[in-house]
Amino acid sequence: MTTPSRGARPREIAVLVGAVLLEALVLAAAGLRLVWTLLFGQPLTVGGTVFLAVVLLAGALWLLRVGRGLWRGYRWPRAAALVVQVFLLVVAFPLLQAGQWAAGLVPAVPAVVVLVLLFRPAVLVWTSRTLR
């Protein structure tokens, strides 16, 4: 396969990257909220809050990198984005089963959108570039 030209970026990539970056933004906001709780609030446990804040902020940075890789047309971010979406569905499924529709649909809807877009032919062609 040939490397896609820069001008041929499909619209699906823009939507896909936007959804991944939105997920990164939500993770970063949750991590920063925990840092705020550490500095100005009463965390339940300091160690657990620090650990969770670091994990959330690192996840946000990773998703930013995944979005950048998808935008540039690399192949490796497809697998990373797929794994994140499966984790989001694992979180959303019990919430939906428990009848907490709002809390369950918030992670489920973007996950389904990203999963559908990851397997669109235009996205597969665009993300066929390898690291060289």
Image (spheres, rainbow, N blue to C red):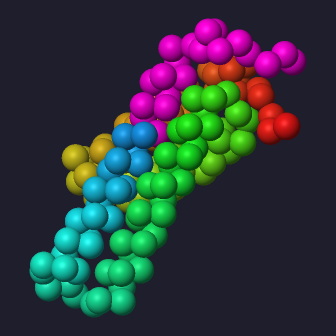
Residue 82's place in the image compared with 1, above or below, is below
Task: Locate residue 132: give its quadrant.
Answer: top right
Viewer can see residue 54? yes
- Residue 130, position as x, y percentages in the image: 80, 34
Q: Residue at x 41, y 48 (%)?
A: 24
Q: Position of residue 35 (x, y in %)?
A: 26, 72
**Which secondary structure is most common in the magenta stretch?**
helix
- Residue at 79 percent across and 19 percent down: it is 3
Vertical side of 25 occupied by 125: above or below:
above
Given the current orientation, which residue lies at the most extreme left position? 41
Q: Is residue 13 magenta?
A: yes
Q: Quadrant of residue 2?
A: top right
| Residue occupying the far top of the picture | 8
Q: Indicate yes or no whether the magenta region holds residue 110.
A: no
In the picture, residue 115 is in which quadrant?
top right
Residue shown at 20% from the left, 84% from the top = 43
For residue 90, say whether it is visible: no
Horizontal side, residue 92 vs residue 2: left or right: left
The quarter of the image holding the N terminus is top right
Q: Total number of numbered labels?
A: 0
Give whichever of 72, 48 is nearer the camera: 72
Q: Position of residue 104 (x, y in %)?
A: 31, 50
Q: Nearer the viewer, residue 109 or 127?
A: 127
Q: Which residues are magenta?
A: 1-20
